[in-house]
């Protein structure tokens, strides 16, 4: 008699998705894969911030395969903001519709070519404005963040 092999676990296990819960005094930040895991660790050190990268939320094996529309929807539904370095999200119809439909707050580096230290600088420099916008309104937003120019607010 052979025993059946255990059923493989779903990529979207309850253990992974439980991480979306926030305390009332916390701000959730989901960092897109192009921003990097190290920045999530740095933001996570701040009081009242829970910063996670895609591998934290979806698992290491699944994270590279998670579509942008999936994490944009999940972040919006659960009230997390998204930090990305992918300005093309705003110009891809499916992704733009997902942002608008789920009231996702997306804050994007205007340049996709910034090295790690510069990413941290721009997000850090604009962080008070980002937190204020995230806390003040539930409607979707898509902001492109520059280091030296005013923020371009494609969707306020």
Image (cartoon, rainbow, N blue to C red):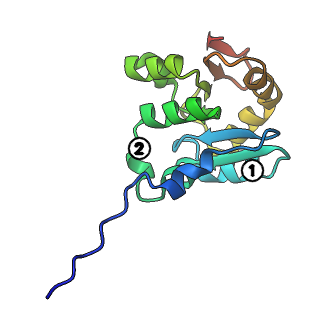
Q: Secondary structure at mark 1?
A: helix
Question: Is 44 rendered above or below residue 84?
Answer: below
Horizontally, is 138 left or right of 100 in the view? right
* Residue at x 65%, y 53% (from the top left corner): 38
Q: Quadrant of residue 31?
A: top right
Give me the disc on residue 126.
none
Residue 102 placed where, x, y %?
53, 23
The residue wearing badge 2 is: 66
Residue 110 image point, x, y percent = 60, 24
Residue 44 image label: 1
Q: Residue furthest left?
A: 1
Q: Is residue 133 visible?
A: yes
Element marked by disc 2: loop
Q: Position of residue 27 (x, y in %)?
A: 75, 38
Residue lying farthest to the right in this orientation: 47
Residue 84 in view in this figure:
no
């Amino acid at each position: 008699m052979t025993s059946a092999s255990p059923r493989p676990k779903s990529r979207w296990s309850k253990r992974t998705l439980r991480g979306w819960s926030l305390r009332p005094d916390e701000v959730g930040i989901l960092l897109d894969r192009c921003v990097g895991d190290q920045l999530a660790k740095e933001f996570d050190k701040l009081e009242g911030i829970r910063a996670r990268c895609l591998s934290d939320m979806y698992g290491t094996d699944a994270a590279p395969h998670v579509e942008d529309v999936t994490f944009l929807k999940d972040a919006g539904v659960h009230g997390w903001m998204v930090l990305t370095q992918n300005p093309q999200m705003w110009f891809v119809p499916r992704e733009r519709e997902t942002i608008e439909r789920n009231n996702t707050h997306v804050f994007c580096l205007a340049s996709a070519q910034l090295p790690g230290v510069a990413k941290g600088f721009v997000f850090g420099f604009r962080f008070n404005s980002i937190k204020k916008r995230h806390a003040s309104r539930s409607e979707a937003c898509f902001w492109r963040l520059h280091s030296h120019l005013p923020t371009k607010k494609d969707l306020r």
